[in-house]
Image (cartoon, rainbow, N blue to C red):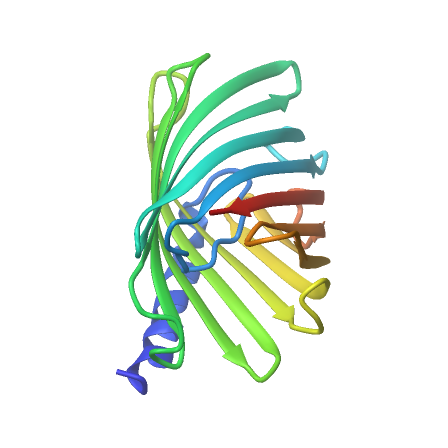
Amino acid sequence: LMRFAPRLTAGLLSCFTAHIALADGSSAGQIYAPYVQPLEKEIELVGVYDARSSRSLIPSSHWTKVGYGTALWDHLYTEVAVTRTVAENETYTTVELEGIWQITEQGEYDSDWGMLFELETSFDRSAHEFTVGLLNSRDWGRWTFLTNVTAAVEWGDDIHDEIETALAIQTRYRASQAIEPTLEIFMAQDTLSMGPGLTGIVKFDGPEQLRWNAVVLTGLDNNTDLSVKLEFEYEFF
C-alpha cells in the first residue's frame, strides 16, 4: 500500500485535471488537511476577494465565511458555516454543513488521506450544492504538500444544473511553527491562479491556538485577475 499510494495520487490528479473543463466558477478558496484532532472545537473566519478580468463571464466578487466545528469522533469532524457573497449588484447568503473524515492515521503510510463532504444551500435563491473531495497530505523533508480534488453537483432554479470539478494544491515549507511560506495553486474551468502566501500558528496558554493563512493569487488565464485570501481558525478543546 505504501508503494501504491503515490501512483494512486498521480492517477487521481491526472484524471481530475483532464476533466477540469467541466468546472464552472471560481475555485479559489480553502485547502483542507486530511486530519481530525479528537475533542477539537474550532471557530473559523475566512475572507476571499476574487477579481475577474474583463473577458471573464463570472463577475468579480468577495465573500466572508463564519463557521463553528467540532470533532464528533476520533476520525470525523463536522462544521456549520454561513457565507455571505457579494457579486456585482447581487448579495446572497448560504449555509453549509461540512464534514471531514480522516481515513488513515498520520504517518501510517507515505502520505495521509481523508475525505471532504459539503452540503450547501442558499437563503436568497434556489441554489444548492453537494461536494465530495479527496484530501491528501505528504511530507518531503521540511516540505508539506496538500492536495484537494473535489467534485460538486449543483442544482436549483437559479443556477445551472451541472457537475463541477476543481483541483487545489498548497506547498508549505516548515521554517518554524509561527510562520511558514506557502505556494497555492487553484484550477477550475474559469479559474487558473497561483501565488505565494504565509501561514502559521499562534499558541496561547493551554491547548488553545490560532491558525492563520494569507495568500495573494495571480491569474494565469484569461478569466482570473487577482485573488486575496485570509483565513483564521481558533482551535480549542
Residue in the image at 29% along x and 63% along y: 103
Q: Is residue 237 left or right of residue 128?
A: right
Q: 124 or 115: nearer the eye?
A: 115
> Measured along the vertical axis of the image, is residue 184 above or below residue 65?
below
Q: Is residue 217 left or right of residue 70?
A: right
> Measured along the vertical axis of the image, is residue 158 above or below residue 45?
above
Residue 120 x/y as whole percent: 38, 30
Count of numbered circles in the view: 0
> Measured along the vertical axis of the image, is residue 79 above or below residue 1?
above
Residue 183 x/y as whole percent: 66, 63
Residue 28 appearing in the image? no
Point out the residue furthest to the front here: 206
Residue 4 placement: quadrant = bottom left
Residue 108 placement: quadrant = bottom left
Point out the residue furthest to the bottom here: 3
Residue 5 x/y as whole percent: 33, 78
Point out the residue furthest to the left here: 1
Residue 55 x/y as whole percent: 68, 36
> Measured along the vertical axis of the image, is residue 11 above or below residue 47?
below
Q: 175 or 188: nearer the eye?
A: 175
Residue 89 appearing in the image? yes
